[in-house]
Image (cartoon, rainbow, N blue to C red):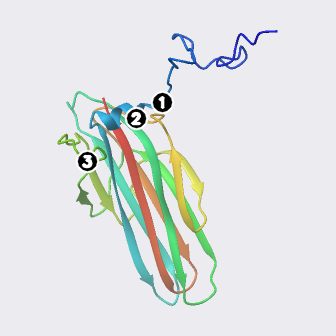
Amino acid sequence: MPNDHVFNPLNRPVYTSITNTFTSPGIVAPPENNAGSTGNLYNAGSTNSTTLGLLGGSVIATVQLTNPVGSGKNVYISRLSGGITVALNLLSSFSGTMTLSANGTLTSPSTLTPVNNNLSSSNTSIATVRFSAAAPTGTTTLLAMPLQVGPFLFNELGRYVVPPGQSINLSVSGSLSVGGLMASTSYFSWWEA
């Protein structure tokens, strides 16, 4: 009995508008592959590292990605990454959170320079990227979740779209109840089209 659906099972079609043969296979790849090869895939982020006093405290790293008014392009979020690092002097209770939010204002921001992931491309990002050691205010929360110590990575593949005149924030916060060294890191990867 022949197997007529080697590459495209009827219950889970992958390739629906191309001819997929063994000698000339169809290829399905995420949009980042094309964005990277054309020089339109970028990333930016930063780390906030602080030695906390005897009573502990919080360390926050917020990156805000803004698509300027009149840019003529959308920003598509490819990846959210970062993490929390802790070096404790004493045993302590730890809590960590990651919050993705829209718009809002940063406290005492500094400007970050986006890096083009295609090292041979001279393209520059349309986005304005800023960093703050405080959580943003006046935002609309899109996603909030607890974090453990260590790195995290969420492949979004364009699920979050930032049109002109809008911003998106990634805030990573870690808290200790006693002294120690803590670092919070947040990074965006995105493409523009």
- Residue bearing the label numbered 1: 29
**Amino acid at circle 2:** Asn
Q: Which mark is residue 64?
A: none
Determine whether 163 is above or below 129 in the image. Answer: above
The N terminus lies in quadrant: top right
Looking at this view, name the residue that lies furthest to the front. 23
Instruction: Give whichever of discs 1 and 3 has the lower sequence position.
Output: 1
**Amino acid at circle 1:** Ala
The answer, for residue 138, to whether it is visible in the render is no
Determine whether 134 is above or below 24 in the image. Answer: below
Q: Are marks 1 and 2 in contact (CB under 8 Å)?
A: yes
**Residue 65 image offset from top left, x and y in percent:** 32, 47
Q: CA gap, disc 1 to disc 3?
A: 21 Å
**Amino acid at circle 3:** Leu
Q: Secondary structure at mark 1?
A: loop
Q: Secondary structure at mark 3?
A: loop
User: Label 2: few (<14), some or many (≥20) within 10 Å?
Assistant: few
Determine whether 87 is above or below 13 in the image. Answer: below
At a point 42% along the width and 58% down the height, the residue shown is 186
Task: Report the label total.
Answer: 3
Q: Which mark is residue 119?
A: 3
The answer, for residue 117, to whether it is visible in the render is yes
Q: Are marks 3 and 2 in contact (CB under 8 Å)?
A: no
Front-most of 61 and 156? 156
- Residue bearing the label numbered 2: 33
At a point 73% along the width and 17% down the height, the residue shown is 11
User: Label 1: few (<14), some or many (≥20) within 10 Å?
Assistant: few
Q: CA gap, disc 3 to disc 2?
A: 14 Å
Instruction: Give whichever of discs 3 and 2 has the lower sequence position.
Output: 2
User: Label 3: few (<14), some or many (≥20) within 10 Å?
Assistant: few
